[in-house]
Amino acid sequence: LPAAYDNRPLTFEEFEKKIISQMKDLNIKNIDFEISFDKSDKISDDGFDDIDFLISTNVGEEKKSLSQVASGGEMSRFMLAFKSVIADIDKVSTLVFDEIDTGISGRTAQIVGEKLRDISKKHQILVITHLPQIAALADENFLIRKYVKDDSTYSNVLKLDDEGRIEEQARLIGGVNITDKTRSSAREMIKQAQNIKEK
């Protein structure tokens, strides 16, 4: 299994341990992960090995195929963990994460944002998020709005300037009623995120 640690391949066992460590950092504390591989009956374009990722996220549950049991948020965080491990050798230029903030908040959201930031050093990252901790760490923020016109649904994408970022950050923090206090909190969060990026 290739990866860019010490310029040598990772063993399956090393890869499993790194994924488990990353997932625990992403607040899936009871993660159990294993790579299952069997020999196929015949060689295909994908090779001779039949490989599956088995995962359990709750104590007492047996490991099952990731594709069958992971929720949207778990799958997104697994992909974030996966990309964190192999980011240095992955040739994919753009990564899209949707529902990356499902079921998380507080410190975990901050950790997710910082991991996304790390990956963004070598990849373009597009993240759809509703969490201010993650949005604050972005280089650019866009507001996506849906509207209905003539019985059809449209999406509008607006790039936010500095004041627009503060307003949307405040909306994420405080909800519908934006106050001077939520704007102040938004400015502080954006400033803290900038300090993290400069480090």
Image (cartoon, rainbow, N blue to C red):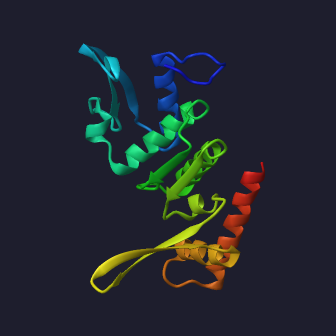
The answer to whether residue 28 is visible is no
Quarter residue 151 falls in = bottom left
Residue at the location (33% across, 38% down)? 58
Residue at the location (62% across, 47% down)? 120
Q: Front-most of 169 and 28?
A: 169
Answer left or right for 171 relative to 120.
Answer: left
Q: Front-most of 10 and 176?
A: 10
**Residue 180 image position (x, y, % from top left):** 65, 84
Quarter residue 42 falls in = top left
**Residue 195 image position (x, y, % from top left):** 76, 56
Residue at the location (58% across, 35% down)? 87
Q: Is residue 145 above or below residue 62?
A: below
Q: Is residue 173 above or below residue 102?
A: below
Answer left or right for 186 relative to 56.
Answer: right
Q: Front-most of 139 and 101?
A: 139
Q: How many marks?
A: 0
Quarter residue 174 falls in = bottom right
**Residue 144 image position (x, y, % from top left):** 48, 71
Which residue is most to the front? 45
Q: Is residue 105 above or below residue 45?
A: below
**Residue 86 image position (x, y, % from top left):** 55, 31
Q: Is residue 89 above or below residue 149?
A: above
The answer to whether residue 89 is visible is yes
